[in-house]
Amino acid sequence: MTDHGEMIKGDKLVLRGLMFHGYHGVKPEENKLGQKFLIDVDAWMDLQAAGNSDDLSDTVSYTAIYSIVKQVLEGVPHKLLESVAQLIASTVLSKFPQVSAVRIQVGKPHVAVVGPVDYLGVEITRYRS
């Protein structure tokens, strides 16, 4: 799921191919039966201190970001993927002040469209203001 056209310079944490079952969507059956969601996350921050120290306290743990994504995807249903992505992005930025920007991609591999698709979804990029 990683065809990012926009380039942000610098170091980043990368989480790819996260999969969760959630109940997000506009259609009643999506809210009742749920479906699989695919998530990719990029979190830009300076990783030099962690690279030099080899100390987890000098970075953000991948598992902490994973936990945020899991809570959002398996939590309260949203109608729109845009809302799901926004909540992930805003939570990461508010919880980790060292993160300067995040890119969140949310994909639905099982959508009701005529024709084959890998997934349909959204991608947002948010910056610390």
Image (spheres, rainbow, N blue to C red):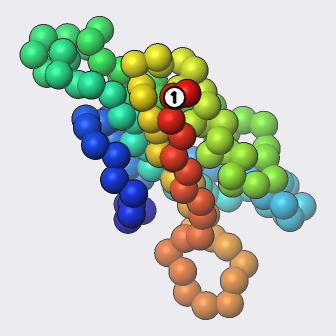
Residue pictured at 18% horizontal, 15% vertical: 49
The quadrant holding residue 6 is bottom left
Q: Is residue 99 above or below residue 2?
A: above
Quick one: label 1, few (<14), some, or many (20+) residues within 10 Å?
Answer: few
The answer to whether any part of residue 33 appears in the image is no
Q: Position of residue 97 (x, y in %)?
A: 46, 17
Image quadrant holding the N terminus, namely bottom left
Quadrant location of residue 86?
top right
Drawn side of residue 78 relative to residue 51, left or right:
right
Q: How many marks?
A: 1
Q: Is residue 82 left or right of residue 48?
A: right
- Position of residue 100 measured from the top left corner of the image (x, y, whole percent): 42, 29
35 and 4: which is toward the camera: 4
Residue for point 17% across, 22% down? 48
Q: Is residue 112 visible?
A: yes
Depth order, front residue of 13/30: 13
Image spot of residue 25 (x, y percent): 78, 58
Q: Which residue is mark 1?
A: 128
> Element under label 1?
loop
The spot of residue 80 in percent (x, y) is 76, 54
Q: Quadrant of the C terminus?
A: top right
Foreground: 128 or 73?
128
What amino acid type is highlighted by mark number 1?
A: Arg
As drawn, the residue found furthest toward the bottom would be: 115
- In this rendered view, identify the residue nearer to me: 8 or 12: 8
Instruction: Residue at 67% x, 58% y: name it.
Output: 35
Point out the residue furthest to the front here.
129
